[in-house]
Image: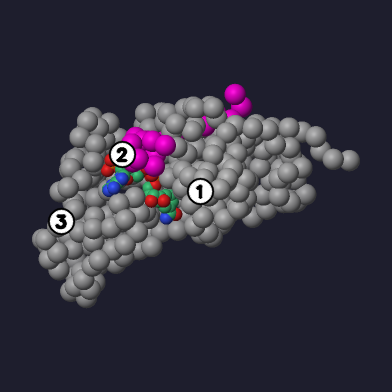
Amino acid sequence: MPDKRKFKAMIIKEEDGKFFRHIGEKTVDELPLGDVLIRVLYSSLNYKDALSAAGNKGVTRRYPHTPGIDAAGIVEESTVEQIKPGEKVLVTGFDLGMNTSGGFGQYIRVPSEWIVGLPEGLSLKESMIYGTAGFTAGLSLLRLEYMGLEPSDDEILVTGATGGVGSLAVAILSNAGYKVTAATGKADKENYLRTLGARIILDRKDVDNPTGKALQPPRWGGVIDSVGGNILATALKQTKYNCSVAACGLTQSPLINTWVYPFILRGVNLLGIDSAHCSIETRLEVWNNLAGKWKSLTLDLIKHECVLEELSEKIDLILQGKITGRVVVNMEK
Ligand SMILES: NC(=O)c1ccc[n+]([C@@H]2O[C@H](COP(=O)([O-])OP(=O)(O)OC[C@H]3O[C@@H](n4cnc5c(N)ncnc54)[C@H](OP(=O)(O)O)[C@@H]3O)[C@@H](O)[C@H]2O)c1
């Protein structure tokens, strides 16, 4: 007996090499096979979703498609013992929203291995204020701490600081006792960054050194970089002896042109951060920290809530680098 349940979703269609978005209807039958059917109550917008919505085939190969790499909601059906209907859960990363129908639809069906139970201390909405962006900021901090980082007088640089990853990196680092220096291209967001806990605010140009010098005076005790390009190359040259740079993004550029000197003369570590496929043990550690000792009191300030019908305009803005904080999508309305 076919399942007739219909639900609302953003659908991206490809016609003659062009991509169009609309809010349409899908049925649960159209979802891919999987262990667990989840009714999505909240999703959130990440840069990768915007790439998928814009037709980037490096993110999504096949269209029509529903993006949304983040989803939080309630289990409706489950074929596995350990996950029960009625449980609150969240999914970030893996293939969700890439080539698997994603969180910009009111239902998703996914393998049980992709699912994390909502950690105690977080609401479904809060979990999506974090979403992949917050998880990535948290994973970056976890990796920096594995490398020996601990709160001190050293400055920790966060680039792309008003973006999703950047805002949450500033918030959780300062919450965890670090002295944060935030670099931004948005001169009017100084108050916002100070409220999140940044001690020093720099113009993006100040961390984008054009000289091409191999090394510069060491300044950073650690870096969370979400922009890549020459800003990442500059950060490497300015990082202190034996300290680490967590590289997680590419909004300036996916290319870095750097010298080996920061690595071989200063022992600098370049840490690659991949939030999509990290192990379940690491996932649980990051989520428990985000719900507990790192939990930011400024989550509400970072969030802009919208409904599915308002999402298209936000997608255009994030592609232009104009979003501050995190867009959370209320999927019930
Ligand atoms: N590795 C992973 O697992 C992972 C997970 C999540 C995201 N990411 C990546 O991380 C990056 C940020 O994602 P997001 O969701 O935080 O995006 P976002 O909200 O759009 O934030 C990106 C920020 O980068 C800055 N920026 C924009 N254009 C720039 C440019 N041309 N040069 C320098 N800075 C620029 C802006 O901040 P300011 O105006 O404050 O400078 C912008 O707000 C993306 O590349 C995304 O793909 C990776």
- The Cα atoms of the two marked residues, 2 and 3, are separated by 20 Å
Which residue in the rendered view is the most extreme toward the right?
1
Residue at x 58%, y 45% (from the top left corner): 15
Crowd tier of the residue under label 3, counting other residues whose Cα lies within 10 Å: few below 14, some 14–19, many 20 or above: some
Residue at x 24%, y 50% (from the top left corner): 157
- What amino acid type is highlighted by mark number 2? Thr
- The Cα atoms of the two marked residues, 2 and 1, are separated by 25 Å
Q: Percent x, y for residue 252?
A: 30, 52
Kind of element beneath mark 3:
loop
Q: Is residue 290 above or below residue 221?
A: above
Quadrant of the rendered image containing residue 243: bottom left
Kind of element beneath mark 2:
loop
Crowd tier of the residue under label 1, counting other residues whose Cα lies within 10 Å: few below 14, some 14–19, many 20 or above: many
- What amino acid type is highlighted by mark number 1? Gly
As drawn, is 230 to the left or to the right of 82? left
- Point out the frontmost of discs 2 and 3: 3
Q: Nearer the viewer, residue 184 or 267?
A: 184
Q: Percent x, y for residue 65?
A: 61, 45
Q: Percent x, y for residue 236?
A: 23, 62
Residue at x 44%, y 31% (from the top left corner): 313
- Evaluate whether residue 273 shows in this view: yes
Q: Which residues are magenta?
A: 316-333
Q: Nearer the viewer, residue 287 or 228?
A: 228
- Evaluate whether residue 69 shows in this view: no
Residue 55's disc number: 1
Question: Disc 2 marks which residue?
Answer: 162
Residue at x 43%, y 45% (from the top left corner): 47
Q: Earlier in the sequence, mark 2 or mark 3?
A: 2
The answer to whether residue 242 is magenta is no
Q: Quadrant of the N terminus?
A: top right
Question: Disc 3 marks which residue?
Answer: 209
